[in-house]
Image (cartoon, rainbow, N blue to C red):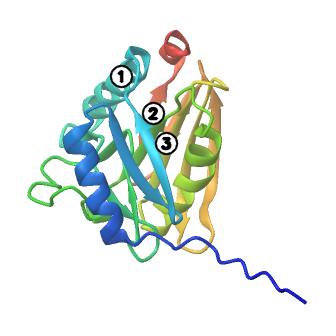
Amino acid sequence: MVVEVRQSPPQMSVDEFETLAEFTAREIETVGLEFVSGRLGVRKARNDSHGAVAAWLACRCLQARPGLGLHPNLGLRVEEHGEGRALPDGVLAPTGSFAGQGAWADPGAALMTVEITSHDPDTHHRDRAEKPRAYAGAGIPLYLLVDRDTLWTAVHSDPDPALGYRQVHMVRFGGVLTLPEPLGITLDTEELAEYAD
């Protein structure tokens, strides 16, 4: 009798990932790498509508809370024990919070992470499932998903490292969305409909 033994592929370590991500960032400007839930993810360059949503959000948040900055594409150490590496579309935090922290910053100062969906096949799994768990695991108070595919915005709050975010409030584009404390900002999402590709 022949018994076939199958081995699962070796897991990439965080150090190996960081080496790969550093090389990729240096060699290919239009691609960024992430490492969430033990899985390698690829982020490609975004289109103009994607950037317009980020600019819209930055403007609204800074009007309401002038001491904050929306840091675009900032690498964060995420998940419960910091073993993940994510590149959110934006991180809302006090201005200057991440100075001198290198490629992968500690998320302690982050008040909210932001993801804006893109039209790629991995969006559902990455932005709607993996990222909320990773950001909650890191203790980030809020996660905002601007979903250009479904025309909804969703704010996730009340993070629990084991469960993810306990609260999710969704509003269709055109409605009013309140970002709860620690922000307490109200967003009129009507303009977002212009950026739904």
Cα gap from disc 3 to disc 2, whole angstroms: 13 Å
| Disc 2 versus disc 1: nearer the observer | 1
Amino acid type at circle 2 is Thr
Q: Which residue is drawn at 24% across and 44% down?
A: 25
Q: Give the quadrant of the N terminus.
A: bottom right
Amino acid type at circle 1 is Gly
Quadrant of res 45: top left
Quadrant of res 35: bottom left
Q: Give the quadrant of the C terminus.
A: top right
Residue under label 3, please give it: 144
Does residue 125 sit above or below 188 in this rendering? Answer: below
Residue 41: percent from left, percent from top: 48, 49
Q: What element carries label 3?
A: strand
Question: What label does residue 82 carry, if any?
Answer: none
Q: Is mark 1 on a helix, strand or loop?
A: helix
Cα gap from disc 2 to disc 1, whole angstroms: 21 Å
Amino acid type at circle 3 is Leu
Q: Residue at x 49, y 68 (%)?
A: 137
In-image side of 128 versus 53 (left or right): right
**Residue 110 seen from this side:** yes
Q: What element carries label 2?
A: strand
Residue 129: percent from left, percent from top: 63, 52
Residue under label 2, please give it: 186
Quadrant of res 97: bottom left
